[in-house]
Image: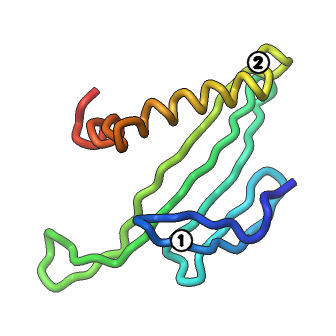
Amino acid sequence: MAFADPQSVTLSGTATSLPRTSPGEQQSYYTSADGLVSLRASHADNGKRRTDSLSLKQTKLAADPYVTGLNKEEFQQVTISINRPKGGFFTVTEAKALADALLAYATASTGAKVTSLLGGEH
């Protein structure tokens, strides 16, 4: 089962449509028309544990800070992974509550914890 097609994300105040570009059994990719933003939803199962992940990737062509006159394609990516045991130890509701708690913590006070983390704090 896949997400609706297309998906939409707002990056730096700009909404970007992400049509499904690669459906699969355990993952789907959604990519912007220019290929610079992509979303991946995936699932992995190793028999004892299940991992459900969402990844948002941004690509850009930028001046290489080390080589004058050279442009380089680079990317950054943020991934949310929920890893839990199989067998009903935790319900979907409990897993969602844990994810909600972490996301709320990370984004409180206009994202202060994410900013601190990116600044090297731990």
Q: Report the residue at 60% width, 31% height from top.
A: 99
Within 10 Å of disc 1 (Cα), the crowding (few <14, some 14-19, many 20+) is few
Q: Is residue 122 left or right of residue 30?
A: left
Q: Amino acid at mark 2?
A: Phe
Does residue 85 lie above or below 105 as drawn? Answer: above
Residue 108 percent across, percent down from the top left = 40, 35
Residue under pointer 1: 15
Residue 22 percent across, percent down from the top left = 74, 69
Mark 2 or 1: in front is 1
Q: Report the residue at 69% width, 26% height from top.
A: 95
Name the residue nearer the viewer: 57 or 92. Answer: 92
Does residue 96 lie above or below 37 as drawn? Answer: above
Residue 93 percent across, percent down from the top left = 76, 26
Question: Which corner quadrant of the image does residue 30 belong to?
Answer: bottom right
Name the residue nearer the viewer: 66 or 55. Answer: 55
The C terminus is located in which quarter?
Answer: top left
Residue lying furthest front = 109
Name the residue nearer the viewer: 25 or 52. Answer: 52
Residue 106 percent across, percent down from the top left = 42, 35
Within 10 Å of disc 2 (Cα), the crowding (few <14, some 14-19, many 20+) is few
Q: Is residue 70 left or right of residue 102?
A: left
Q: Amino acid at mark 1?
A: Ala
Residue under pointer 2: 90
**Badge 2 or badge 1: first in the primary sequence:** 1
The N terminus is located in which quarter?
Answer: bottom right
- State how far apart marks 2 and 1 are (Cα): 34 Å
